[in-house]
Image (cartoon, grey):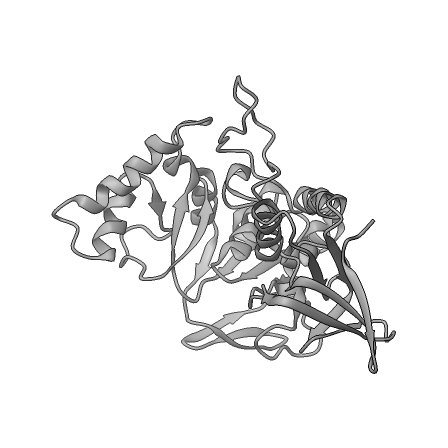
Amino acid sequence: MSRVNFSADARGDALEADYVVVGAGTSGLSFIDTLLAEDPDATVILVDRNAKAGGHWTTAYPYVQLHQPSYNYGVNSLALGVTRNSKGHELLARDELASGKRILRYYKRVLKQFKATGRVTCLFSHEYDVGVATPLDGGAATRLVASKKVVTCLSDVRVPSMGPPPFPVADGVTLAPLNALGDKGTIASHDSFVVVGAGKSGVDAVCHLLDEGIAPDKVTWVVSNDVWYFIRDGMFPEERGGYFAAADRWFTCTLKKTIRSAADLFLEWEKLNIVGRVPLGAEAPTIFKGATIDSSQLVQLRSVQAVRLGRITEVTRDEIILEEGRVPLASNELVV
């Protein structure tokens, strides 16, 4: 039975706990997991606008995977990775990258653990605003009382399916979020593709198309800014274990007297295959957002036609207009 208390006042029933946590993504669940472990009496009300836990994973594209090994992700009390050493402890497995579906199943298990303590009550499909949780279906609102603290674990992370494109698109243009590429029929029904963006989502879209058998000359990649990528198999030369040896390689570079700037460090890391960039011989990127790929994906990215003419300002029925030029848009071409 839940240990969260209900109390009533002139404004109706209120749900009370030590903490109200807003957001059931990675940060919110990790906070609750640590709180339950370190405070044996703490009670929590968890509120999220989504119907289930997982934050942006609930709307992610179907072929998404973690950037980093599963070993590095999840809450402390429950391992996400399945690789174990001889003593049964979770082991770093470089190529074990949990899928979005697996992560959602994992968070479902995490919530089951939370509820089993009798100290956590969940309000999903609710919007939180200044002490009130309102169901999205229009039902009665619930007043929430946090005797200790309200912890807001919300971020500005957005995936393409969560909103319209950031540029005008003419009627008649076939445009879809990269979630659509999870449907083999969608891929088969188009002759060519334009992928917008050089972040991890754009990289995944390009590589997914190539993995599905689309020829490189049928993929155009719009790159507004080149970036550095972590190279997973360069960061972790060993497929299993070797975490501390790998970390020693990364950090030893920072101690070299020749390293006088972040730019110097990334060029040194590039020599060790810890980071990589798509265009070779060009000016080194000045942007790094932590996206991680492997060496084979870097080869794939170099095989398609990249358009480096700034950001898209408009897509018409005949062309893509960018800050520094224009690119023709073919018939039956899907803009992703």
Q: Nearer the viewer, residue 12 or 217?
A: 12
Q: Residue furthest right?
A: 139
Report how many numbered discs are placed on residues in the image: 0
Q: Is residue 25 above or below residue 72?
A: below
Residue at figure coordinates x 54%, y 26% from the top left? 89
> Could you say which quadrant of the image residue 180 lies in?
bottom right
> Could you say which quadrant of the image residue 172 lies in?
bottom right
Residue at figure coordinates x 69%, y 67% from the top left? 174
Q: Picture coordinates of residue 332 (x, y %)?
A: 68, 62
Q: Nearer the viewer, residue 5 or 80?
A: 5
Query: Which quarter of the rendered picture does the C terminus lie within?
Result: bottom right
Q: Is residue 35 above or below residue 169?
A: above
Q: Picture coordinates of residue 289 (x, y %)?
A: 42, 58
The answer to whether residue 283 is visible is yes
Q: Is residue 301 above or below residue 124?
A: above
Q: Picture coordinates of residue 75 (x, y %)?
A: 58, 45
Q: Nearer the viewer, residue 278 or 1?
A: 1
Residue 320 as seen in the image, left or right of residue 139: left
The answer to whether residue 332 is visible is no
Q: Residue furthest left?
A: 257
Residue 100 as seen in the image, left or right of residue 282: right
Residue at figure coordinates x 57%, y 61% from the top left? 194
Q: Picture coordinates of residue 167 (x, y %)?
A: 57, 77
Residue at figure coordinates x 50%, y 41% from the top left? 72
Q: Residue furthest bottom?
A: 10
